[in-house]
Amino acid sequence: MKKNILILSILIAFLTTACGAPTPATPTAPPVDIAATALSIASTSAAATIAAIPTATAIPTATEVPYYLTAQIWAEEARVPIINYHQFAPNTSEHSTDHKIRMEDFIAGMDALNQAGFVPIALEDWLKGNLLVPEGKKPVVFTMDDLFYNNQIRLDENGDPRLDTGLAAAWEYGQQHPEFGFEWALFSNLGDKWYADGDPEGKWKDELANTIIWCIEHDARVYNHTYRHIRLDLSDAQGVRWELEQNDLFLRELLASKGREDLIPQLGNMFAIPFGYWPQGGAYTAMVNYATPEGDPMLGIFDIDWLINGAKFMPPPYAADFDPLRIPRIAMPTEAVAYLVEHKDEFPTMVSCQIGPLDAEQVSNVDYVGDAIQTSIASGACPAGVYVIEGKNFDARAGQNPHWIE
Ligand SMILES: [Zn+2]
């Protein structure tokens, strides 16, 4: 404690001096060692490392500060497990099933994944090329099908999620464990059930609209699972198109009923196949060519599979074996979680590395950055892999001439 007070006194004295000193006519040398500061900042994971000098006086512009960029690197190809949940059962239920997981088992699974170093990522962002995952963490995706049942999520009379519903419990867990957070992709069938308690007067639509708005605003994004949970293998092209479109139109109608058309740009176009029954021929073509009312093309189609058939994971979107029209998901959440925890060391994480020193003027030039990555790899300072630098991805895998992935 005494030591802290001493440091505080020195700090106050320093700040008082710095603030109270008369403005010098000529720039003075900063009261710290620039080189040492730059070095210590470069060794942290700060993104752009132009040294921030803790002083109120202006920094002399002539001083040479080594400029580094921090790269986050997938040195090994990412493997992203996508777990598929359905509904929730109270803790009084005897055991969890594929379609109804006990609330306790559900949250215990979240915690087991968190302890094992997994972190949920936003599925749509990943598919669109946001490959950034916190250093040392393994990405996992949570999906849920057949929305909206009132055991999956329901709001109370104040508009807050009821903690006896599944998604609300996951959200609460994320609030208590911010390093884990809350990211979900929800695949909805809006036309096959009355929401909540169901009532013929149409109040269910009101509750459903409010629930959907809450979800979208809390990073549980809403996607398509057909309007009435149909079997696509028994449908023709027209039927498939109608099911996909009807779900999308009703979703927009619900948002519009609350004046929340502003959320429509967050809806996207992703589709999970009901029952895992794939359509054939013209029906298949209709499915993959389906565009939303706003004209967004299909971004991803999701399958369902069981671990007994072999564990399958989503490769990164740049990988040779990535097929956006058949992305694997794992059924049976309790088994899936147990598998992931047991095999946690088989899932790579990102590493970080400093690229530089660089010419600060040129760092927005992707060719220049590509060359700098090449130099860092050649010198052995950084590993080959896919680099994320300042929100841009660079393919610098072995055998590649490092280049920006647009
Ligand atoms: Zn389903």
Image (cartoon, rainbow, N blue to C red):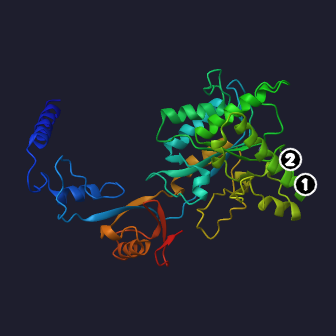
**Residue at the image point whose x is 78% and y is 41% from the top:** 250
Camera-side residue of 11 and 377: 11
Residue under pointer 1: 235
Q: How many marks?
A: 2
- Whether residue 229 sits left or right of residue 71 in the image: it is right
Distance from disc 1 to disc 2, alpha carbons, whole Å, reads 8 Å
Amino acid type, residue under disc 2 in the picture:
Ile
Ranked by sequence position, the earlier of labels 1 and 2 is 2
Residue under pointer 2: 230
Query: Does residue 404 sit above or below 234 in this rendering?
Result: below
Camera-side residue of 132 and 202: 202
Judged from the image, the secondary structure of the residue bearing numbered disc 1 is loop
Which quadrant of the figure contains the C terminus? bottom right
Q: Quadrant of residue 163?
A: top right
Q: At which x and y percent is residue 88?
A: 70, 32
Q: At which x and y percent is residue 39?
A: 23, 59
Label 2 CB sits under 8 Å from any ligand 1 atom:
no
Judged from the image, the secondary structure of the residue bearing numbered disc 2 is loop
Looking at the image, can residue 275 be seen?
A: no
Amino acid type, residue under disc 1 in the picture:
Ser
Looking at the image, can residue 3 be seen?
A: yes
Are there few (<14), some (14-19), or many (20+) residues within 10 Å of tag 1?
A: some
